[in-house]
Amino acid sequence: MITIFCAWGTISNIDSFVQKLLEFSKEENLVVQAFDATAIYNIDHLISASAHAKRAFDQGTNATNSLALEILLYAAGERQIQKAIKKIGVRKGKQRIAFLFTDEKNQKRNRHPDDIIIKRLLHTFHLTLDNTVLQGDRTTLKRFGITTQELSTIPEGKYGDLILEKIALVDVIK
């Protein structure tokens, strides 16, 4: 189970935001991760990162003890938490935020967050739902180190594949 949605809002204190997000995650018995939506190319980007992170836990190759952090690493294409946070983490101030809800390693197959849970998260953080914000572009790709030369070798319709390759390469980086 994976649910992805986006919102607009202001984060005044990162530590407080992260703490509240952890509390929300525990209360709802869900894995919850938040990202700077401008750093996410599309929904497939986060679905792939989640699948890779869950597989890392299944195979015992995870770099962290938290599925949420493992998802962050894969989504960033990094193996170091600080680099991942710098690249795709939420920041202080007004911004677009992408959220990913999932369960621990697919153990609760029938559990799917409903609108009430999403609305509760939005209310908790004073955010406004806006699913139009997950639309990456060349700038998003360059943020991942993809060069203009690399972009010129494939059609624009395949740009999302470059992000998926960066996610897959995390398994190679040790």
Image (spheres, rainbow, N blue to C red):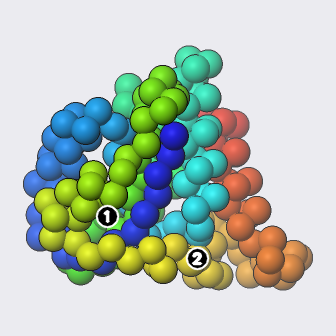
Residue at screen point 31% across, 64% down: 90
Give amino acid for label 2. Gly
Residue 147 in percent (x, y) is at 71, 75
The C terminus - image quarter: top right
**Is residue 174 left or right of 9 when viewed as pictured?**
right
Q: Nearer the viewer, residue 97 or 122?
A: 122
Residue 13 percent coordinates (x, y):
11, 63
The numbered mark, 2 or 1, whose residue comes first in the sequence reads: 1
Q: Is residue 169 rendered to the left or right of residue 35?
A: right
Q: Please give the count of numbered marks on the rendered protein.
A: 2
Reply above or below: 146 against 15. Answer: below
Residue 140 drawn at (x, y percent): 57, 75
Is residue 125 or residue 56 the one in the foreground?
125
Question: Does residue 172 appear anywhere in the picture?
Answer: yes
- How much space separates mark 2 and mark 1, taking CA atoms? 16 Å
> Which residue corresponds to mark 2?
136
Task: Tell me which amino acid carries mark 1.
Answer: Val
Check disc 1 and report the residue beneath it.
90
